[in-house]
C-alpha cells in the first residue's frame, strides 16, 4: 500500500464518524492550547520586566537591607530592616571608598495617601534626593524639582506625578498648592511629565519628597528602605559593586561574607533573577498543562480501541482482499497521528488567540504595555508532542487491529 493510499484510507475512516473524531482530539486541543498560552504569557512577562528595568538605566545599582532573599517572606521583610543608615550613606558618598559612583540617594517609603482640601487620595510617597528623578528618567512638566538644598534644610516640598495631580486638582493650578502627607503640609513645586510604568509600578502615581523630611517628620526612624546609586558608566558597574560591598562590610564590621546584612543588585542581576522566576513559574504551569496531553492520549487510545471493535468486519474484508497486517497496522497508526496533529494545529491557533486576548486584557487592567509574544518554539514542540502522542497511544489499538484473524473478523456481528 502506497503512502498516498494509506493516508487517503485513514482520512476516509476518520470522516466516517466526524463527531467522534472531534471529541477524540479535544484533550489534545486543550493541552496544546494551554501550553501555547502559558508560554506566550510567560514570554510576555519576561519582555515586560526587561523593558521596565531597562527604563532605569544600565548604570543603576540598588542596595537592599538584609541578606539575599531566599523566599517571599524575605522580600517582604526588607521594608522593615534597619541595616542601612546615615553612616553607610556618608561612607558610600566618600570618593575614596567608591570612586566609580556618580551619585546616590536613599529611599524612605512613607505609608498612607495624600490629602488636599480634606479629600484623601491613594498615592505612593517616597523620600529621596533629586538624583532619583534622573534615575527614574523623570522630567518636569510643570515647575522645577526640589534641590539638594531642600534635602539639607528638611523642607516641606513635593514633586507629584500626573495622575496624582489629576486626582487632587483636576484642571486647577497645582503649583504652589499645599497637600497633606501624614498630617503635615507640603508645597507642590513640580509635576513631572507622564512617565508610565517603571520597575513594575506606576510612577505617575508617585509623590517624591526630600528623604530627610520623610525620615525625621513622617516615619520617625533612622534607617533607609534602600539606597539607589548610579555608576559613572556601564563599564564601571562591576568595580562599583565590589567597592560598595567592601565599604558596607567595613562600615558594619563584617569580616565573614556569609554574615552580610545587605545585598547589592545591578539591573543585570535583577533581570536575570526575574527571568529565572518567570521561567520556573512558566515551566511549572506547562507541566500541569502537559497532563491534559497525557489524558488526551489515553482518550485517543480508548476511542481507537472502540473503533477497531466497530470496524472488525472492515478489517476482515480488507485482509481477505490482500491487505497485510502491516497495512492494517499503519492505517490505524496514521489515523491516530492525523487526529493528534489536527488537534495540535487547532490547539496552537486557539492558544495563540487566547494569549493575544490575555495580553490585551492585561494591558488594560494593569495599564502597562504588555507585549504579545507568539512562542514559535512551543508551537513546534506542540506539533511534535501531538504526533508523538498519536504514535505512542495509537500503537496498541493498531496492533489489536492488525492481529485480527480475517475469518473470525468476517464472522463478527
Image (cartoon, rainbow, N blue to C red):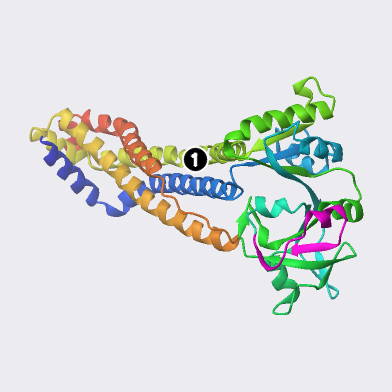
Residue closer to the observer: 295 or 379: 379
* Residue 19 visible in the picture: yes
Instruction: Classify residue 6 as left or right of residue 378.
Output: left
Instruction: Classify residue 252 as left or right of residue 236.
Output: right
Where residue 364 sits in the image (x, y, percent)?
A: 56, 63
Q: Residue at x 80, y 73 (%)?
A: 176
Residue closer to the observer: 409 or 189: 189
* Residue 111 visible in the picture: no
Residue 150 is inside the magenta segment: yes
In the picture of the structure, the residue carrying the numbered disc 1 is: 286
Tally the numbered discs: 1
Task: State which quadrant residue 323 falls in.
Answer: top left
Instruction: Classify residue 217 as left or right of residue 159.
Output: right
Q: Residue at x 46, y 49 (%)?
A: 37
Q: Which residues are magenta?
A: 139-159
Answer above or below: position of 157 versus 19.
Answer: below
The 10 Å Cα crowd at callout 1, few under 14, some 14 to 19, many 20 or more, is some
Residue closer to the observer: 207 or 21: 207
Residue closer to the observer: 216 or 299: 216
User: Which quadrant of the figure contains the C terminus?
Assistant: top left
Where residue 200 sits in the image (x, y, percent)?
A: 63, 52
Instruction: Classify residue 138 as left or right of residue 375.
Output: right
Task: State which quadrant residue 76 falls in.
Answer: top right
Amino acid at each position: 500500500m502506497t503512502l498516498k493510499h494509506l493516508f487517503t484510507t485513514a482520512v476516509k475512516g476518520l470522516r466516517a464518524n466526524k463527531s467522534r473524531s472531534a471529541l477524540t482530539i479535544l484533550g489534545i486541543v486543550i493541552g496544546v492550547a494551554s501550553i501555547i498560552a502559558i508560554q506566550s504569557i510567560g514570554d510576555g512577562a519576561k519582555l515586560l520586566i526587561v523593558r521596565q528595568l531597562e527604563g532605569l538605566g544600565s548604570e543603576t545599582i540598588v542596595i537592599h537591607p538584609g541578606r539575599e532573599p531566599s523566599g517571599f517572606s524575605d522580600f517582604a521583610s526588607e521594608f522593615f530592616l534597619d541595616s542601612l543608615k546615615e553612616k553607610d550613606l556618608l561612607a558610600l558618598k566618600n570618593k575614596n571608598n567608591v570612586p566609580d559612583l556618580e551619585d546616590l540617594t536613599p529611599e524612605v517609603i512613607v505609608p498612607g495617601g495624600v490629602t488636599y482640601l480634606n479629600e484623601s487620595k491613594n498615592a505612593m510617597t517616597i523620600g529621596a534626593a533629586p538624583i532619583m528623578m534622573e534615575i527614574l528618567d523623570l522630567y518636569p512638566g510643570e515647575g522645577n524639582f526640589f534641590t539638594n538644598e531642600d534635602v539639607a534644610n528638611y523642607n516641606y516640598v513635593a514633586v507629584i506625578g500626573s495622575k496624582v495631580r489629576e486626582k487632587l486638582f483636576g484642571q486647577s493650578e497645582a503649583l504652589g498648592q499645599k497637600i497633606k502627607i501624614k498630617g503635615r503640609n507640603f508645597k507642590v513645586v513640580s509635576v513631572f511629565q507622564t512617565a508610565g510604568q517603571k520597575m513594575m509600578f506606576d510612577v505617575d502615581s508617585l509623590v517624591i519628597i526630600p528623604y530627610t523630611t520623610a525620615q525625621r517628620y513622617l516615619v520617625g526612624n533612622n534607617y533607609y528602605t534602600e539606597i539607589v546609586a548610579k555608576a559613572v558608566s556601564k563599564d564601571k558597574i562591576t568595580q562599583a559593586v565590589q567597592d560598595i560591598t567592601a565599604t558596607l562590610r567595613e562600615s558594619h564590621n563584617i569580616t565573614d561574607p556569609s554574615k552580610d546584612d545587605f545585598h547589592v543588585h545591578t539591573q543585570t542581576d535583577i533581570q536575570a533573577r526575574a527571568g529565572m522566576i518567570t521561567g520556573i513559574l512558566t515551566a511549572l504551569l506547562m507541566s500541569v498543562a502537559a497532563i491534559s496531553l497525557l489524558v488526551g492520549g489515553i482518550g485517543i487510545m480508548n476511542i481507537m480501541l472502540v473503533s477497531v471493535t466497530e470496524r472488525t468486519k472492515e478489517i476482515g474484508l480488507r485482509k481477505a482482499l490482500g491487505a497485510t497486517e502491516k497495512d492494517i497496522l499503519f492505517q490505524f497508526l496514521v489515523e491516530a497521528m492525523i487526529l493528534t496533529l489536527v488537534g495540535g494545529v487547532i490547539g496552537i491557533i486557539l492558544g495563540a488567540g487566547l494569549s493575544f486576548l490575555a495580553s490585551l486584557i492585561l494591558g488594560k487592567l494593569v495599564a502597562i504595555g504588555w507585549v504579545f509574544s507568539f512562542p514559535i518554539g512551543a508551537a513546534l514542540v506542540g506539533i511534535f508532542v501531538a504526533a508523538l502522542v498519536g504514535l505512542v497511544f495509537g500503537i496498541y489499538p493498531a496492533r489489536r487491529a492488525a492481529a485480527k484473524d480475517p475469518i473470525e473478523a468476517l464472522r463478527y456481528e
